[in-house]
Image: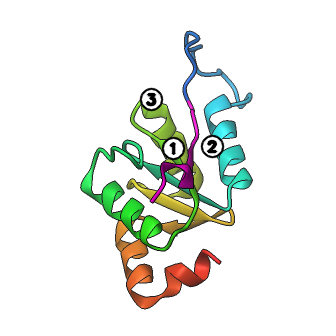
């Protein structure tokens, strides 16, 4: 499997972090997550990267996607805890990894595993 099957999405900036807005002003991290979900047919929010997963659940999810030859984008949530916080607020799903297909959350590792074993994951990725 070539490493070009996925596209890492950077969510971090080297610029200093501004304090959170006092009101309901724009939220750059939430906006970046929403934009990334909308721009990629398949996107996996995970701990680590596809080449170096940082947890077994992320590794298993990557393995299933790769076994189906499914191109996917990947976002490492570990560099900034706000990524995980905002992602969970958007998806209403507390655990990582989170797999989105066509802008919709499919689920975490357990649900993706069930879908993989039943053939539903392969169908969803078409």
Q: Which residue is at the far bottom?
A: 118
Quadrant of the image for the C terminus? Answer: bottom right
Q: Considering depth in this image, is 9 or 70 the residue closer to the camera?
A: 70
Provide the residue span drawn in magenta.
1-11
Between disc 1 and disc 3, whose residue precedes? 1
| Residue depth check, mark 1 versus mark 3: number of the one nearer the observer | 1
Query: What is the spatial separation of the Cα atoms under label 3 and label 2, in whole angstroms?
Result: 13 Å
Residue 47 percent across, percent down from the top left: 37, 45
User: In this rendering, does residue 93 appear at all?
Assistant: no
Q: Residue at (55%, 14%) from the top-left corner? A: 14
Residue 55 percent across, percent down from the top left: 27, 50
Q: Locate residue 17 relative to residue 41 in the image: left or right.
A: left
Between disc 3 and disc 2, whose residue precedes? 2
Quarter of image, res 102: bottom right
Q: Residue at (41%, 60%) from the top-left corner? A: 62
Q: Locate residue 51 relative to residue 42 in the image: left or right.
A: left
Query: What is the spatial separation of the Cα atoms under label 1 and label 3, in whole angstroms?
Result: 11 Å
Q: Secondary structure at mark 1?
A: strand
Mark carried by residue 80: 3
Disc 1 + disc 3, Cβ < 8 Å: no
Q: Residue at (55%, 9%) from the top-left corner? A: 16
- Is 21 located above or below residue 101 in the figure? above
| Residue depth check, mark 2 versus mark 1: number of the one nearer the observer | 1
Q: Which residue is mark 1?
A: 75
- Is 86 located above or below residue 119 in the figure? above
Residue 9 percent across, percent down from the top left: 58, 39
Residue 5 forms part of the magenta stretch: yes
Q: Residue at (74%, 28%) from the top-left corner? A: 25
| Label 1 Cα crowd, 10 Å radius (few <14 / some 14-19 / many 20+) | many
| Label 2 Cα crowd, 10 Å radius (few <14 / some 14-19 / many 20+) | many
Q: Which residue is mark 2?
A: 33
Disc 3 + disc 2, Cβ < 8 Å: no
């Amino acid at each position: 499997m070539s490493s070009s099957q996925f596209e890492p999405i950077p969510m971090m900036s080297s610029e200093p972090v501004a304090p959170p807005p006092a009101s309901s002003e724009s939220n750059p991290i939430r906006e970046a997550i929403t934009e990334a979900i909308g721009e990629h047919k398949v996107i996996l929010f995970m701990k680590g990267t596809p080449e170096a997963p940082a947890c077994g659940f992320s590794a298993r999810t990557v393995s299933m996607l790769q076994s189906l030859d499914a191109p996917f984008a990947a976002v490492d949530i570990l560099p900034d805890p706000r990524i995980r916080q905002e992602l969970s607020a958007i998806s209403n799903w507390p655990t990582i990894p989170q797999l989105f297909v066509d802008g919709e959350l499919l689920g975490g590792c357990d649900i993706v595993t069930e879908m993989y074993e039943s053939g539903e994951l392969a169908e969803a990725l078409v």
